[in-house]
Each structure stands twice: as C-alpha cells, then as structure tokens.
Image (cartoon, helix red, strand yellow):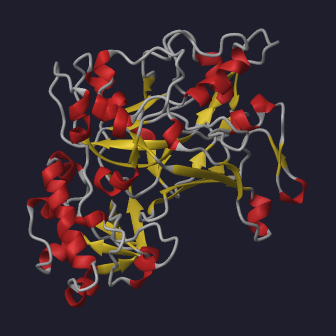
Amino acid sequence: MTLLNDTNDPALKSWVASANEVGCDFPIQNLPFGVFRRAGSDEAYRGGVAIGDQILDLSAAVAGGLLSSAAAKACEEPTLNTLMSLGRPAWSDLRAQLSAVLREGGRQETGAACLVPMADAEMTVPAKIGDYTDFYSSINHATNVGKMFRPDNPLLPNYKYVPIAYHGRSSSIRISGTPTKRPMGQLKAPDAEMPVFAACKRLDYETELGVYVGPGTALGTTVPLEKAEDHIFGMCILNDWSSRDIQTWEYQPLGPFLAKNFSSTISPWVVTLEALAPYRQEVYSRPDSDPAPLPYLTSKDHEASGGLDIRLDVAVATEAMRKNGLAPQTIGTPEFKNMYWTIFQMFTHHTSNGCDFNPGDFYGTGTISGTGADECGSILEVCKGGKAPIDFPGGETRTFLEDGDEVIMRAWCEAESKPRIGFGDCRSLITPANG
C-alpha cells in the first residue's frame, strides 16, 4: 500500500498563504496535478500543481532550476500521459521535491515567480484519455435503481461476485465548466407503440470518482491485486451524465450506449494516491450472508487498506436561483467508503482477462450512493424515478434536470489530526438540445 511519509505531515505549512487557510482544498499535503494555460492566451497547455488558490507552473519551475527530474520535465508537455507512465517512484520523488519547494522555509523567492493565480488560468482535460470504462460499484445505488425495475429482485445474481462495468466513450469527456448539451435520442413511452426521436426528458447526473491509470500493461497480462496501485496515478471527480429515457429504451440487450456517451464532466485536478494515504482504511464490511470475493479479488493487505474515506456533495442551482443570488442546493452527500468494490479490485478485475491499459486511460467508479435519503448520487434516486419531486427555493420543483440547471459536485477527505485533501469542484450548465 501507499505509505505515509514526510509530505503527508499534517503540521506542514506553505509559504503560499492561501494554502494554510482552514477549509482549503489544496494545502501543501495535497499537491494535485493538472494541465493549464493563462486564460485568454494562446500559450501552450502545460502541467501545474495546485497550492492554495495558486498554480505552480511546472515548466517555469524547471526553467528556474527549482525542479530537475525527468518527472518534472514530463510536466512541460501538454498532457500528463508521460508523467503517468513513469510510475510510483518517479511520482513520489517529484512530490517530495514539490513539497520541499513549497513548504515554509522552502524556495519562496524563486518559487513565487512561478505561480499563476487559479482565477487567471484555463484548465483542460489533464491526459489524452485513450479508453474509458465505467463501473457500477455502489451496492446502494444498484439496489436503489434495481428496485424501480425489479422490486422483488433488485440485484442480479452476478453483482456480488463481479465488479460490473461497461465501456464508455473517452472522446466526450470534458473539463469542469464546459456546458452539457441536452441529448437527442429515441424515446418510447410505456404505452406507445413506437419510439420517437426527440430531446431527452429525463436528464440525470451521476456522482462518481474517476481514476487515471499510470504505467500501462501488455495485452495478455494480468495485474494481481497487490500490484494494482502501482498502476493508479490518481483520482478526480466524475459526473457521468445519463439520459434515463434514452437508456430505458436502448439498454437491452447490450447495455448503455447513446444514453451515456454524449458527455462526461471531470474536475481538473488529479489527486494522487500518495496524497490520499492518510485516508486509506478497511474495505466495505460486507454482510455475513454475502459471498466473499473470489481469491484474485481479495488479500489481507487489501482488506486492511483498500478503502478510501472520501466525502462528496452534489448540488443544483437553477437559472432562477442564480439570477436571485441564491446558493446551490445540496441534494446528495454520499460517501465513497461505502462502495462495494474498491478502485484496486476494479483495476485487477479489468485486467483479469488480459485486457491491456495505456498511461492516461481512465475508469469511473460508478454512481456513489449511501443508504440514507440524503446520500443519493443521482437525481433518479432522489426523486424516486420521477414520483417524488424535489423542492427548490422560489417554488420551483424538479424530478429530472431542466435546461439552465447547473450541477456542482465537490469531494474531499477530512478528519481530526489529518490534513484536508480536496478535489476542487466539477460543474456544468445544461443547455438546450439541438433543434
């Protein structure tokens, strides 16, 4: 497992004052990676590290002699794929260098010249994502949705044995802040004889975390569970948009297609496993009546530290709320620690048939939901399939999302005597369908 080291010390402070503020997502113990350029410029995109409300420009840091490793130089490229390919020792060494530069007593005089305010930056998708897989790893979400279609048998027999997933569309992954256009598609009402082609009427979000793959694998090879984290670079927030009415008509017999691939929104910062080390914990405790994972999906070390204590918040701001200066309304606060399958089991299972990975490949965890009414990760669950409208300020209600609604997701780790590790936010505004 990823061990704690000097960079995780909760007592560390940065000479970047905003990084030391209470509630800051990006203290010196975090140091997530992203790709940026100055907003409105024609500069090349390049790697940066978030620190407080600033970005350390890694190209400038290399040019200024602050950093000199191969990993640092890889961050001069317009994507992080090369950095991701270098592996854990290189990532850890770069993180240690960054921590030394940015901590109190570090390289403030030279480092300050390499900072760019986040408010002046334009972010982009941090890697060239070749392939994208989306898992279905929250038993609470699977049960909640299953009850709507199969009240007496919400979970299919394979769920407790297999980390279920489908192959998504990497070409439509977009960075936070990019608008999401309502999709067109075939819709069929339950009492209709034939489908119609129209704009989606049951647009939904899905609150997930995304995982970036580091070093790749060769076709025909498998990765044992104890080696899975060697291939995981880091995590971000993922909103896997879903058109529930298109999905209902098309998903049988082969599963999701156009209902899922029209857009996926991700947060810009990649939080590394090393930053998340203080929040590793035991895996989800399965009921005694559930089958144990098959041997290739379990080990003593994994049982002790395969879980991650990450909290999430999903909120919606309608167009009227924004015009009236009202804050977004939180409608879900799921916790990642309740996931039935871990990110390590997902990766190991994905390679178990010899499927190969490339650096920068991406997979989603599946919608994260808890057991409480306020812990749902999709509006489908909150509104019970459209039967329980959600009240918003000003007398507005929603069952599914409407044009002009903005969905904002946040994620963070926080506990007493531990540094707060934030993911920033993942937001997108819904715009009308074509035609």
Task: Identify the residue at horizontal 66%, vertical 39% (top origin).
Answer: 376
- Left or right: 119 with respect to 76? right
Res. 408 image quadrant = bottom right
- Left or right: 209 with respect to 352? right
Q: Nearer the viewer, residue 280 or 57?
A: 280
Q: Is the residue 147 above or below the residue 180 in the image?
A: above
Q: Is the residue 88 above or below the residue 368 in the image?
A: below
Q: Residue furthest right?
A: 395
Res. 30 image quadrant = bottom left
Q: Residue furthest bottom?
A: 109
Q: Nearer the viewer, residue 70 or 100?
A: 100
- Left or right: 382 with respect to 275? right
Residue 278, percent from left and from top: 36, 55
Task: Identify the residue at horizontal 78%, vertical 8% (top origin).
Answer: 193
Residue 289 in view: yes
Q: Is the residue 150 above or below the residue 91 in the image?
A: above
Q: Nearer the viewer, residue 323 or 157?
A: 157
